[in-house]
Image (cartoon, grey):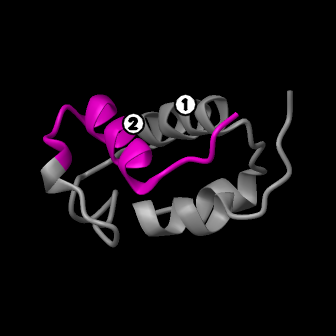
Amino acid sequence: MPMMTDRDVQEIVASILDVDVSDIGIDTSFYVDLEMDSLHKAEFIVRLERASGAELGPAEAAEIDSVGDAMRMLRDRPRVS
């Protein structure tokens, strides 16, 4: 599976929240700036895991509040099949 890019993560968020990709910067807060709720967050984590092939634990998923956070979390993660 190819490595995820910032743009890939931005596109996932944009499709879930129905916002323009250009509105999502690397450090844009999903909660504060984009008003992501817990159901959106759950969908985001599932889609991120599927797209990246990585598995995130609940504590790790809870730490993600931006594209930058997601990319840091995915860096050097073991991939699952």
Q: What residue type is labelled 2?
A: Ile
The residue wearing badge 1 is 47
User: Residue at horizontal 25%, vertical 52%?
Assistant: 35
User: Residue at horizontal 78%, vertical 51%?
Assistant: 57
Q: Considering depth in this image, is 41 or 50 the residue closer to the camera?
A: 50
Q: In which quarter of the image is residue 33?
A: bottom left
Disc 1 vs disc 2: Cβ atoms closer than 8 Å?
yes
Image coordinates for residue 31, horizontal then vertical, percent = 33, 59
Q: Earlier in the sequence, mark 1 or mark 2?
A: 2
Quadrant of the frame with the N terminus: top right
Please say whether residue 7 is one of the residues in the magenta stretch.
yes
User: Residue at horizontal 59%, vertical 32%?
Assistant: 51
Q: What residue type is labelled 1?
A: Arg
**What is the magenta segment's predominant secondary structure?**
helix
> Residue 57, relative to residue 1: is it above or below?
below
Secondary structure state at the residue bearing disc 2: helix
Quadrant of the frame with the C terminus: top right
Q: Quadrant of residue 66?
A: bottom left
Query: How dense is the environment of label 2, judged by Cα within 10 Å: few (below 14), some, or many (20 and up)?
Result: some
Q: Give the range drawn in magenta.
A: 1-21
Q: Considering depth in this image, is 51 or 38 the residue closer to the camera?
A: 51
The residue wearing badge 2 is 12
